[in-house]
Image (cartoon, helix red, strand yellow):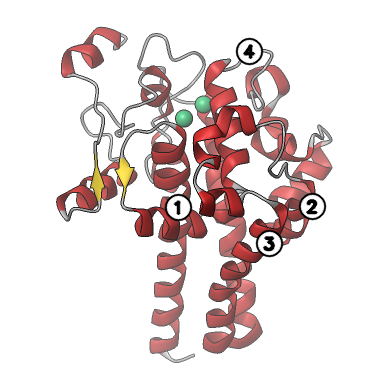
Amino acid sequence: MEPSTLLSMGALLLVWYLSVGFGVTVAYHRVLTHRSATLRKPVLYALVLAGLPAGPPAEWVGNHRRHHADSDGPNDPHSPVHDGFWYAHCGWYLGVRNRGVCLLYALGGPLRYIVDMFLRQMSPGGHDERAKDVLEDRFLRFLSTRFGYIVGSTTQALPFVVAYFLMAWEGVAIAWVAGVVFYNAGDSVNSVGHLWGKQDFDGAGAARNNRFVALVSLGEGWHSGHHAFPRSARHGLLNGQVDASFLLLRLLSLVGLADDLYLPSAEAVTKRRRG
Ligand SMILES: [Zn+2]
Ligand SMILES: [Zn+2]
């Protein structure tokens, strides 16, 4: 194997990981769901397209707002405290609690798309009330319909095509494994993030700050900070808590592509801090 091929494959996986990751953490989560910042429309749309493995935007936003409205309560769509690890990790997408089925789905990687295209709740649907603002945008509404989601998802074939040209089927297999890692890194925020780690803040329920989850999810693992201050553009609120998604938002604001970054005051953070 040529070292240059391996280097190209590594670069592909890194760019892919960062684009899917930031698509979900920055666009879906911090900008669309919590309005922690605004983005220029082309940047927002590009990031949402990259984040489509997370599901249709309106459904994602609706479910996530439900999660915050009754975190670890009876109406939380994915609470490991109430429903166990596997249901919160990925079983809730399918509405199944069987561990074997959850494990198969967790290892499905890109195959999850086929299931998601037909089983995920598209617009119009039950989540629409909670995601009205998202559905007001024509492009985001289109991506939230079944037809639009399928059309938008064709962009996700690109990394596999590049991987095939670089390393043939071996490349496709490596990309597949990378896809499995991406999905599980994101899902771990809902499962691990409410079970293991430090409860640094009051009023954050069962949410935890978990350094490993924060690393693989580009800052989303600072989940105690996030639940204490849901609108904050920065989730890693304490010293030493590196938050890659916030760093990207800062960078985008420096070059004029993001605005209105919301941050809680230092006093408010100190007041809610435990210990
Ligand atoms: Zn949470
Ligand atoms: Zn949130």
Kindly indicate whether the residue at mark 4 contacts the one at mark 2 (C-beta within 8 angstroms). Answer: no
Disc 3 to disc 2, C-alpha distance: 10 Å
Residue behind mark 4: 73
Q: Is residue 32 visible?
A: yes
Residue behind mark 3: 150
What amino acid type is highlighted by mark number 3?
Ile
Residue behind mark 2: 118
Of marks 4 and 1, the one in the foreground: 1
What amino acid type is highlighted by mark number 1?
Gly
| Residue shown at the point (52%, 87%) measured from the top left | 166
| Residue shown at the point (73%, 61%) measured from the top left | 111
Q: Is residue 120 above or below residue 157?
A: above
N-terminal label among 4 and 1: 1
Residue behind mark 1: 23
| Place of residue 62 in the rendered image (x, y in percent of width and height, measured from the top left) | 59, 32
| Residue shown at the point (37%, 40%) measured from the top left | 219
